[in-house]
Amino acid sequence: MNKIIAAAMFATVALGAAANAANLSGAGATFPAPVYAKWAEEYKAKTGNALNYQAIGSGGGIKQITANTVDFGASDMPLKPDVLATDGLQQFPTVIGGVVPVMNLPGIKPGEVRITGPILADIYRGIRKFWDDPVLVSYNKGVKLPHLPITVVHRSDGSGTTFLFTSYLSMNAAHWASGPGANVSVNWPVGIGGKGNDGVAAFVKQTPGAIGYVEYAYAKQNHMTYALMRNKSGRWVAPTAEAFAASAAGAKWGAAPGYYLLLLDQPGANAWPISGATFILMHAKQANAQTGHDVLAFFDWSYKNGNPAAEGLDYVPLPEGVKGLIRKSWLKITGPDGKPVYK
Amino acid sequence: MSTAEISAADPAPRRLASARGSRFEPFFHTACFVAATTLLATLGAVLVLLAIGGWPAIAKFGVGFLTQNTWDPVADVYGAAGPILDTLLVAALAMAIAMPIAGGVAFFLVELCPPVLRRPIGTAVELLAGIPSIVYGMWGLFVFAPVFAKWVEIPAMSAAPAGSIWATIFQGIPNGTGLLAASIILAFMILPFMAATLRDLLATVPAQVRESAYGLGATTGEVVMKVTLPYVRRGAIGAAMLGLGRALGETMAVTFIIGNSHDFPKGLFDAGSTIASTIANEFNEASGMQASALIALGLVLFLITFAVLALARLMLRNQARL
């Protein structure tokens, strides 16, 4: 009897010590890295638990979590439910961002030019070559579109931003879906490639008549000339935090197994059509229940307290209802004993 | 008696040191041997691993990997003729720009420079060689490109008569990026190394040789072209080859400014992509066949660079024999 009590006490002490010294590691997408770093900093100040996140890219994050070298992976591309099942992974979104078409047109201010998904696909396919193309003009009555050749700028490095953007083009144009398709990098029919958001932005800034696509936070912080996009409800929307939130709110998260959901062309009067969440990947069966618990405790804390930090960095927090759904789905992440690691 | 005298005169510490030295000798030999062979083994391992990693792509696409030009990560079809051609083209252009300038810098430092300026200019050239390539890339994209577009690309494109060969050569997007812009940045990067090596080579020309040429009434230009340059010719070619080796493999600066398009370039101002820039761009997010194709690209670059450096070594050896 004494032995059992002693063992139990020892276990408690050991667990307590482990919890105190928690040092979590994650790796993956570069897009959410600033907000994860900020959350980790605040979390450490509050709880003493440290979290080390390496921004090595979504593909790297998926490889690392599959190889079990990190406690969690992060990816801008959600994994399909069958892939999750095969690799024994669970995934959940953390914050929302999106892609914004930006351009360099002399005399044109941000939000003056209106573009639809099919036109964007035509431009990136090289079908529409000039800014005063009749189809573009028909959506932009009263805007003086110059007779300038359109220079297409895309990302040259593999990127979740490109995945989201090309997925959107595929949804909006059959020629894109059957042609270049959707991926982190594709076989671009036309245009030049810039490395990273700053590379794309530099090319756009230096080339009159250029169009490119960058992350929302980047476009906002650098005051780039963005286009208005037509969303699923037929309304013209500007890329604002509210428009991204509307996109996330309108999405049917509950009906998406494994939260496999691209926030493209979501319903909602104010929804921005090219939005996307970034995701965390964890093993459904945790080898160490305490580690699994610590990781989920961090994200639970971040859901509760992290919104101001996320908004400060121009990310859009998840709607509260979605967070509730995710917390319930955490019950599927279990320890070696088959019990949920975090409640 | 005489033996005793000698041993007495011989300082004891030296004998002691020598005894310790001979004990140390085997370790020294082993350490040097290990250092040298580790390097060789690493080189071999890199080659073998590149071949293994790239094998799926090589086996699937065969010669087409070198001759076809499709780079489609969605359909998983890879042919790298574009990046291979651009790599050679950009490196050749960079050499064409850098070699005369490096020669000029070296000749000036050795033949014409006032002694007061020799040290500062020499040090500046060596410092230039130490600037990280990302700095060259950033400078190229944000500072050089706008200037290059305004003062070179746009005037050249407007001056070229439509339909002429110049219109074809100057084709592209006039935003200061592309093949020629990348070549110029690359030339800046390999210039210091080549200039410094050439300067050291020219300094090895015996004073008698140079002075007899002057004595015969040769001008500075004639001395350089007819006497000192032929004297160091082989070594100079070796230095140029080492510069070319760096130009072939340079990654970050080129990635920033070349425009990163896998298509065959249509003109000097058009966007392209080199082997190194393609790997740097895509390896992070690549998996499966794409990763294998990128590793195979690495193997191709390895072989090209290896050939260049082997050639340089051969020439340097001939120079040493002279």
Image: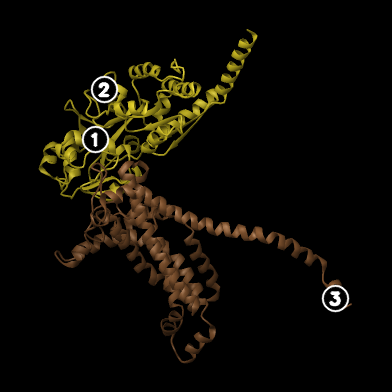
Chain colours: A yellow, B brown
Q: Is residue B148 visible?
A: no
- Residue shown at 29%/52% (left/top)? B259
Residue B205's x, y, as percent? 51, 80
Residue A122 vertical position relative to residue B277 in the rendered view, above or below: above
Residue lying furthest bottom: B216
Q: Which residue is mark 2?
A: A251
The residue lying toward the viewer, choosing from A298 and B211, is A298
Q: Which residue is mark 1?
A: A167
Residue B72's x, y, as percent? 24, 46
**Picture quadrant where residue A4 is located:** top right
The residue lying toward the viewer, choosing from B302 and B284, is B302
Residue B261's x, y, as percent? 27, 51
Instruction: Give the spatial CA distance, label 2 vs label 1.
Output: 16 Å
Residue A59's x, y, as percent? 36, 38
Q: Are marks 2 and 1 in contact (CB under 8 Å)?
A: no
Left or right placement of residue B227 versus residue A197 in this view: right
The amino acid beneath tag 1 is Ser
Labels 2 and 1 positioned on one and the same chain: yes
The amino acid beneath tag 2 is Ala
Chain containing mark 3: B
Q: Which residue is mark 3?
A: B3
The residue lying toward the viewer, choosing from A26 and B259, is A26
Q: Quadrant of the N terminus of chain B?
A: bottom right
Chain containing mark 2: A
